[in-house]
Image (spheres, grey):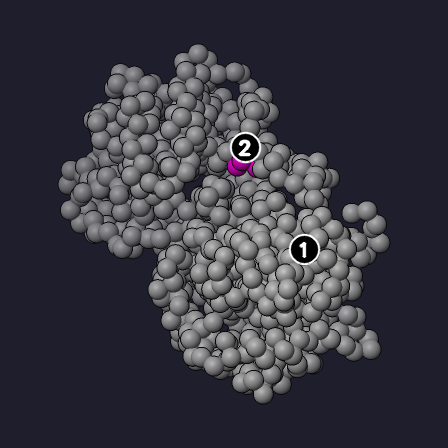
Amino acid sequence: MINFDDFSRPEEYISPFDKHFRKVLRKHLEETVMPYRRQFDEDWKDHHLIEPAFDKLMGELGLQKSLFPQEYGGWGVARSDYVFRIGYMLSEELGRADTGMAVALCVTFWPLLVIMIDPFVNERLIKEFAPMFCDTKKAVFAANAMTEPQGGSDIENLGLLGGRTIRTTARLEGDEWVINGHKLWPTNSGGVAKLFGVPCTTNPGSSDPKDFAFIYVPADLPGVTQGGSYEKAGMAADRNSDIWFEDVRVPSWYRAHGPGTDAEAFYQLISFGQMASCAFLTGAMMNLYERLYEFVSTRTYNNRPLKENDAIAGIIGRIAGDIDICRILGHEAAMIGDRRNKPYGKPLISEDVVGRIRNIKDFISDRAVENFGKAMDVLGIYGADRDWDIEKHWRDIKIIQLWMGGKQLCQMESARYFFNCETL
Amino acid sequence: MNKNLDELFIVSGNPLDEDAKSVVGLVRQWADREILSKRMEYREGYSKLFAEQRRRLNLDIGIQWLTLPEENGGFGWNDLSKAVDIAHVLCEIGRADASIGSLLAVQYAILATCTMKHNLNRKLCDMFSSLYISDTVRTPALILPGPGMAGKTSALFLGRSILTQVKAKKGGYTITGRNLRPLLAGAAADLFCVVCAGEKDDRACLALVPGDAHGISTGSPLRTTGLNACGNADITIDMVSISKENLIDHDGAAEELHTWLNLLLGAVSVGAGMNFFEILSDWSETRVIKGGFTLKENPLCASVLADVAEETALAKMLLFDLAQVISASAHEGLHTTRAFTYSEIIGNRIQSSIIKAINRGMELMGSAGYAKEWHVEKHWRDVKTIQSLLCGVGAEAPVKMDTARFFYNCAEL
């Protein structure tokens, strides 16, 4: 009988790592996350239940060290030719279980990728940060502190604005950077992360990429203040808060690379985030299929199972068809990333890669929002019921459509690329 | 927002009369003063303030007995011609809190099957007036036909399974149904209105079952996407006895119930959509992108804002068109099947439009639309819950079957 694994994916794209680790991860999530995710949904503020689950997933299973080179105790994934596709696999399996947990874990990779993906590698910082993540069985999180109160998605719109609207400043004093600013909404804030990656400007108001700085800030430094967790519609496992940096001093070598290179390296991770977003969504939709399959097989309209009614079959058929197409597209987004160093590929910072991956993310987001909403209506009076999990996914995945500049920035990147728009 | 919603979102038909205007005005005042201007306080103290505000609206203003006959002490809005006015009232309530609005929508829909002038049942009017004209906030619940269970054949109401049976006994009836899912408020109801299958011909009829009747058991409280304050739970009705008067079995009673539900829950969602429009409008005037342009002055954002306004305006126009259809029947009597079909088509479209408007508007608000602090996500969850509840089962498919039956005389659907 067909199951959720049968949704299409280009088999030639799949990494060798996928073949054995997907099973291990899935078993882990089916035992430690999926049976408890409804309770996690209520645990948004304190993470009493979620934290031990993260310890098992990130610390004991070891996912948090996966990017780091083997010589520092990691698994060497960041140096792999498959880093995007492995990221896709991890994100998809996590998304199937709980997109909030998926986001919290994958965002931990995010700031680290700025110094780990060829050609932008900072060996000194990798070596310095490795013990924090590799030498512990407790979950350790990182966060990207990007969004600012005045700017919304402006930071993700680096291609156009060149960091002109960034107000968080970095000032070099001797061999230290002094950071000042206010950030909103980072995943893994609210006291969760141990390390922040902070996009700053060294020259406020400048749109010269050389004035963009990506600087690492340990969360326990004096001058770092985090607010309480925001209360949100969903994504309980992903905590967010305000962060204030007030004369925070970090060593000068905590800047990711240097003038000009920081902007390029940072821009790469936007595409990684968009690709992971696709995977969270296809994973969640695979779980939607599982739960919907059960409902339409066991509940009736006109005294026949829902799936045997032609009109309802038309609706659920479209949902399954969309999942199939989205999964193919999601893998394509990952492959675009992994072609970056190939002769037939394009650099991650190219308009080609940015435009195409954003385009895929926009498409999958729309299909996911639509399909979860439709599935809730298929369940009818049970659609809003937490016991069917579909409504949890519906609440969780909406923010994926909204984040990283949201739908409109995706549309703009797509237009810029495909139509050579010059003033957008 | 310094714009007048009534001027922005027009509706067809005659203006409200003075009586209706004053009731709608009172409810709007309640919404503005008690909830909308104190959103943060209301959210933070929700469980307590929800009960307080229901009390203020239902009892202090008297909305609980709005649709009861004047001779029973009600406002006398028990005529089909008042459909437009009732929809206005529920719009105002939905603008403030969809949970309060939905509970009242369910109550009015139940009452409309037996207290309207064309179907007035004197004994039930007396029963309802003693129940509703009191100093206690009342909570009715409704159990509609919906999904059946595979392997079990059930009586049908237009394809939806009726899971409750009624049997005649001396002096009344017994009602039986297991693991029933009320629309709302199963855990809190003092009265259940249950669509049942009649004993002989499986024809749908409505049983009014007191919430404290012997034989009713309530399951665990349900957690749902929205409308959680309504306190839902599954119930089992085990051979519960009711009096003869408590069975409403005139032709088309179940269709009438659905007709009113589509109208009234539509009004609640339109009200929620109105408030979302207000919030988004403020947002679009105070937030900037690309380093300085207000959202509303950017052509792409403006087109999203236009979508929101368009969907909201259409939903409101459709809502009041449906209200006019019902209202106009006051002279010729309610053409049950036609009104039912139109209510299904329009009700479905209203919910789709409002959820689309909120979904699109949230795209512009980004994370703020998702955070509870901005009061948008509650509207989003509440309206989505109403939409799914009204679908009953199978998304829009059953509505399409109802529509095809009416317009094409399909015989086998």
Query: For the magenta stretch, what is the residue range?
Result: B276-280
Residue B104 position by quadrant: top left
User: Tag 2, which secondary structure?
Assistant: helix
Q: Give the number of the disc on residue B134.
A: none
Q: Give the number of the disc on residue B278.
A: 2
Report the mark closest to the observer, 2 or 1.
1
For the point 78% across and 47% down, the residue is: A424
Residue assigned mark 1: A201
Residue B116 position by quadrant: top left
Residue type for callout 1? Thr
The location of residue B36, given as percent across then percent down, is: 44, 31
The location of residue B389, given as percent across then percent down, is: 43, 46
Residue type for callout 2? Glu
Q: Main secondary structure of the magenta part?
A: helix
For the point 25% across and 28% down, the residue is: B132
Q: Give the residue at the far bottom of this rendering.
A: A71
Of all chains, the one bearing label 2 is B
For the point 52% across and 27% down, the residue is: B320
For the point 63% across and 61% down, the residue is: A173
Within 10 Å of disc 2 (Cα), the crowding (few <14, some 14-19, many 20+) is some
User: Tag 1, which secondary structure?
Assistant: strand
The location of residue B90, given as percent across then percent down, is: 42, 29
Name the one closer to the observer, A20 or B155: A20
- Regarding residue B109, the answer to whether it shows in the image is no
